[in-house]
Image (cartoon, rainbow, N blue to C red):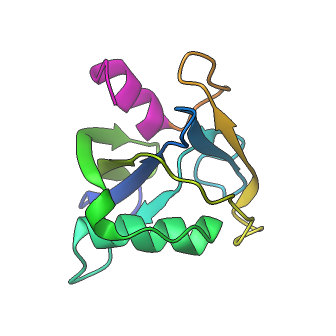
Amino acid sequence: MSENKTPRVGIGCWIFNPAGQVLLGRRLSTHGFGTWAPPGGKLEFNEEPADCAARELREETGIIIPEKKFHLVGITSDIYPDSHYITLHYRADGITGEPKLMEQEKCAEWRWFSLDNLPGPLFLSAQNLLKTHTRI
């Protein structure tokens, strides 16, 4: 367990294209290496959660959408071997931009998937959301 035993706030950005497919990336960072996850990251001090969703999406994929397009779809408590996150999951629909690999050290690829044909393994926060929310 890390020295900081305080849970952190994570943000997940579930974005869907006009065909209803969700964008997921295969993680390269040690935290969740090899798992598939939506764009996302950590909430910064003094940052509004929807602003964080828009920022993380832009930083990771190059896709720019306004924070007002995001709406909260779920909250999960995600306990990893060395950390604990409360993750706020946001959704935005009808996204037409094509993702770019903006942080190649953190993500191997971005791909669109149908919700009924998701890749595996999924990142823990994504697993937890899909287990507890029948609709995202």
As displayed, is residue 135 above or below residue 105? above
Q: Find residue 96 and report its image quarter.
A: bottom right
Q: Does the image show residue 9? A: no
> In the image shown, does 63 or 77 lie closer to the viewer?
63
User: Of all residues shown, which one is farthest toward the bottom?
Assistant: 46
Q: Find residue 103 and report its image quarter.
A: bottom right
As displayed, is residue 59 above or below residue 116? below
Residue occupying image coordinates x 32% and y 78%: 44
Name the magenta segment's main secondary structure: helix
Residue occupying image coordinates x 31% and y 23%: 135
Give the x, y percent position of residue 134. Answer: 31, 18
Q: How many marks?
A: 0
Q: Does the image show residue 31? A: yes
Residue occupying image coordinates x 37% and y 29%: 128
As displayed, is residue 111 above or below residue 7? above
Q: For residue 125: magenta?
A: yes
Residue occupying image coordinates x 53% and y 47%: 38
On the picture, is 34 further left or further right than 1? right
As displayed, is residue 128 above or below residue 31? above
Give the x, y percent position of residue 43. Answer: 32, 70
> In the image shown, does 103 or 111 lie closer to the viewer?
111
The residue range painted magenta reads 124-136
Give the x, y percent position of residue 114. Answer: 60, 25
Give the x, y percent position of residue 89. Answer: 32, 46
> In the image shown, does 12 or 7 lie closer to the viewer?
12
On the picture, is 59 further left or further right than 131? right
Quadrant of the rendering where the C terminus is positioned? top left
